[in-house]
Image: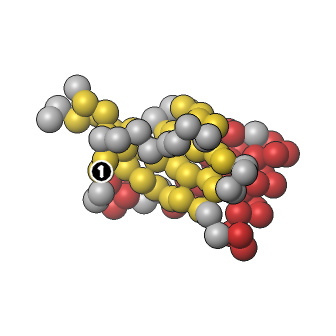
Amino acid sequence: MKTLYANIVFIQSADETAEPEKIYRKRGARALLDYLKQWDYGKESETELDDNEPWGLGDMVYGIDDYIVTVNLKMPYFGLCRKIESEV
């Protein structure tokens, strides 16, 4: 089995990071996951799959269920990917 990643959402612009940062700082990674999951459209979100790990060295990475939540407060940005196991 090979792990692929579906990029669900990546939020980086200054005017869009305030809400996820507030959620993350006050309620943690699980609450941030719940917020970011609003952009997961199931199979529709699986059109572009990548086999590279979708996080950088400076990111805080949280594996929760089938999701990877990435947080970088210095940049700032927030990301959500879903892991998909592939036979290929």
Residue drawn at the location 17% of the way across and 32% of the way down: 87
Please state the horizontal and vertical placement of residue 31, each as a whole percent of the image.
Answer: 71, 44
The percent position of residue 58, horizontal first and vertical second, equals: 61, 40
Q: Which residue is mark 1?
A: 49
The quarter of the displayed image where residue 2 is located: top left
Q: Quadrant of the C terminus?
A: top left
Q: Secondary structure at mark 1?
A: strand
Quarter of the image where one finds residue 63: top right
> Amino acid under label 1?
Leu
Q: Residue at x 35, y 41 (%)?
A: 52
User: How many numbered discs sit on the rendered protein?
Assistant: 1
Q: Position of residue 67 (x, y in %)?
A: 49, 39
Q: Residue lying farthest bottom?
A: 15
Q: Residue at point 51% right, 59% down?
A: 9
- Seen at 41% across and 39% down, the residue is 53
Q: Residue furthest left?
A: 88
In this picture the colour scheme is: secondary structure
Whether residue 69 is visible, yes or no, is no
| Residue farthest top in this picture | 1
Specify the quadrant that holds the N terminus.
Answer: top left
In the image, is 29 to the left or to the right of 2? right
Extreme residue in the right direction:
26
**Residue 46 in view, yes or no:** yes
x and y percent of residue 23 in the render?
Answer: 77, 51
Label 1 neighbourhood size at 10 Å, few (<14), some (14-19), many (20+)?
some
Q: Is residue 14 left or right of residue 9?
A: right
